[in-house]
Amino acid sequence: MNPFAELPVVLSLKFLPYIMAGSMIGMFVGAMPGLTSATGLIIMLPLTFYMDTHVALGMLVSIYMSALCAGGLTAVFFNIPGTPQAAVTAIDGHPMTQKGLDNEAAGVVIGASFVGGFISYVILSTFIGPLGEIATKFGPIELFFTALLGMVCAAGVKTKYPLKGLAAGFVGFLLGTIGMSPMGSIRANYGILELMEGIPFIPILIGQLAMSEVLVLIEKETVVPKKLAAARNFKRLFKGIIYPYRKPVDMVIGSVIGAIVGIIPGEGATMASFLSYSRAKESSKRREEFGTGIPEGVMASELADNASTGGGLLTSLLLGIPGTGSCAVLLAALMLHGLQAGPMLIIKNPEVISRLLSSLFVANMIMVFFAIIVAYYIGILLFTPTKVLIPIITIFCTLGAYIIRNSVLDVWLMFIFAILGWWMRKYEYPTIALVVGLIVAPIADAELIRAHQIHHERLLIAMVSSPIALIMMGLNAALIYFMFRQWKWKVEDEE
Amino acid sequence: MTMKRERYGMGKYILTIAVMAILIVAFIGSASQAAEKYPSRPIRIYVPWSLGGSTDYMARAIQPFLKEVLGAPAVIVVNKPGGRSLVGVGAFARERADGYSIMIDDAASMGVAYLWTDKPPFDWNDFTALTQLLLDPRYMFVKKDSPYKDMNDFVEDARKNPGRLSVSVPAGSGAHWLMAYIKKVMNLPVSIVGYPGGGPASTAMLGGHVTGFFSEGLARAPLRDKLKAIGVSIPEKGTVFPEAEPMVQQRVFKEKGVTSLPGYEAAFNTAVLVHTELKKKHPDRYKKLLEAVFKVKDHPDFKKRAKDLNIDKVAVWYSPERSEEVRANALKDYQANKWIIDEMKKK
């Protein structure tokens, strides 16, 4: 697949303004603590309904990229990660600001995000073709275990309490089996005709990931407690931007870690930035200085953070199993435009993928431009009062839930799951696990039925004789084992 | 309050009011437009099958042209696969009859969906056809490098290895129905595996998860270098895969005394459907849609595209009356052979 073939289209006036708008929105939600990149994508989801498919996807990808970068900026300046993925950036980023190196630190965030995004783009465009071929090797049995893995990952990676994560995941899974079974019998719709086609995942996703954030924001007047003036110096900012090129080895290793970890479903970016940071620390000569405010730490985290987008998109597009909230929204957008993720997407609609890749490439460059502006004005931006933010986000969430089927039931579902999501946040249940559970349940359900239709009584033998299925089973077991082991350590530490 | 006002400054208030004003104007603007002319909102084409099947293929082929001739802000293909096509047909049945939703589906598959239970979620006369778009027979497909040259090889191998061979079909489709018939009359020990559409069903065959794939030819034309057809359901050769021999003329079928296959012309009869109520409630919209569909047929760019996509080989574009006749005949045929549906329900 030639990644540059679609560049002229993406750079045309029909396309480019949307990518720029996406970048601005991404910067805003990314910089705003409490709002994630997924919220930005969700806000724009109803508007994409009226856009050309390619333009819509380009804009959403642009939001995704920019939000990850802006999250790092907030972490550097205020020690508050703008997005959960940027938590690791704060470890070294904020001490740099305290030392008076805020311009350099912001520059490193921008520069490393750009390099990470670029390498992620290279990896995605190189591997999506060949991996598409491999993805067709995933038959019913393999897909069943992969879908399970998606749920377990989303349940386990981010939570402190593995049981809570799994509980949220299984509740999502159970909700996903409501409606018509693949063979046409109706399950658990309690006579509500609209539930016959199952619980629609988009309203749930909006409620759980975006609207529940709004409910948390209600408690505050402004997102950041005090107004911060920031006088920036472009020369020092630029010095930070070019910093990654002075460490080419670390640059490549950090990005590759991000790209690989990003493939694993379930908040891949957080784990990616953490792993990349630890690796940089372990292999550095200045190991003791990590955490006191050195650019290497900021770079390692931000590189992996943005590099993970490519990996996340890869699993989402090839198998239809979303790794992150943002990827789940992207899948929803694909669905709104009548496209379905899966190996056939690459074979039948290669233009969708190639334009997505070109958009990613362009969005990555535009991101740098807007990130510099945000670095200058972040103090004012974060002081937007919640009474402006909340109504706007609420309107877009409601619109997004309604527009998919023109159904008021969907709006109610969105609000019900927003309240549930708010409660889950309070008690540290991962909302993403419920959403991913809901999305993968129909896949797992239908594939298991098909596996039985093919193998009948030999199903169990067939399961253990497929190498891919065995790997997936092993990964499932290993993940659950590590989740609980880590949890046990934590409990012992606290005692 | 005065304290707060000083802290935020007037600018923030003006911003809030401006954003609200823009949103309100946008809403009022779109609402008043709706009262004026049809179509002012996006039109949805319901496809009760997943992406990549022939129904979907056809819907996507006409989508941009329908948008152009109707002057609609958008025409969107909505795939609602699952539950043997009942999810999509049921969702379409619940849509308002306001001309903003149409459906593309195969009469044979709708017949199966309608007769499957005593209480189907829609009535046969809820919908009426604007035009029958396609008439395409069903083919048995195998991978290009498969050792089977024709149905004789396939059937004999299936009998040698009972239960080892499998055939994927769009679950609950006319193809599924016909495959269940063939399995029964040929006494064929194969597993039939249902997918929510021809797209994933063909992917499963190409990925080697099932041995064969049984469905219509149109959407498989672009996959010609990956698969081959080893038999066709009608007594003469098909147009998309003319190399496939008619099944009933192949030795194994003759041996069993199977001289013809049931199902209305044993083929895929895909039509553009609207709610019957639309004719009464909005006769102007019905007329506009009907005219638009035939304008798409005569659109020079569509003609070119139809040729590229092999659609011209199977397109029929029947008049609404003729299309309704075909639908009625299809239903009769399916009612007469209700035992096949019982056969489909068996594992």
Image (cartoon, rainbow, N blue to C red):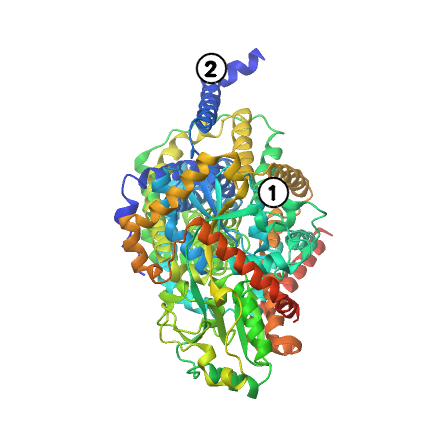
Q: Is residue A200 above or below residue B37?
A: below
Q: Is residue A90 above or below residue A462?
A: above
| Residue nearest the viewer, comparing B36 with A223 | B36
The residue that disc 1 covers is A208
Residue B52 visible in image: no
Q: Quadrant of the C terminus of chain B?
A: bottom right
Mark 2 is surrounded, within 10 Å at the Cα level, by few (under 14), some (14 to 19) or many (20 or more) other residues, namely few
| Residue nearest the viewer, comparing B339 with A277 | B339
Q: Amino acid at mark 2?
A: Met
**Which residue is depicted at the point 34% across and 63% down?**
B313
Apparent side of residue B48 relative to residue A175 in the rendered image (left or right):
left
Q: Is residue A462 above or below residue A9?
A: below
**Which residue is depicted at the point 60% across and 42% down?**
A208
Mark 1 is surrounded, within 10 Å at the Cα level, by few (under 14), some (14 to 19) or many (20 or more) other residues, namely many
Residue B10, numbered label: 2
Image location of residue A224, percent across then percent down: 53, 30
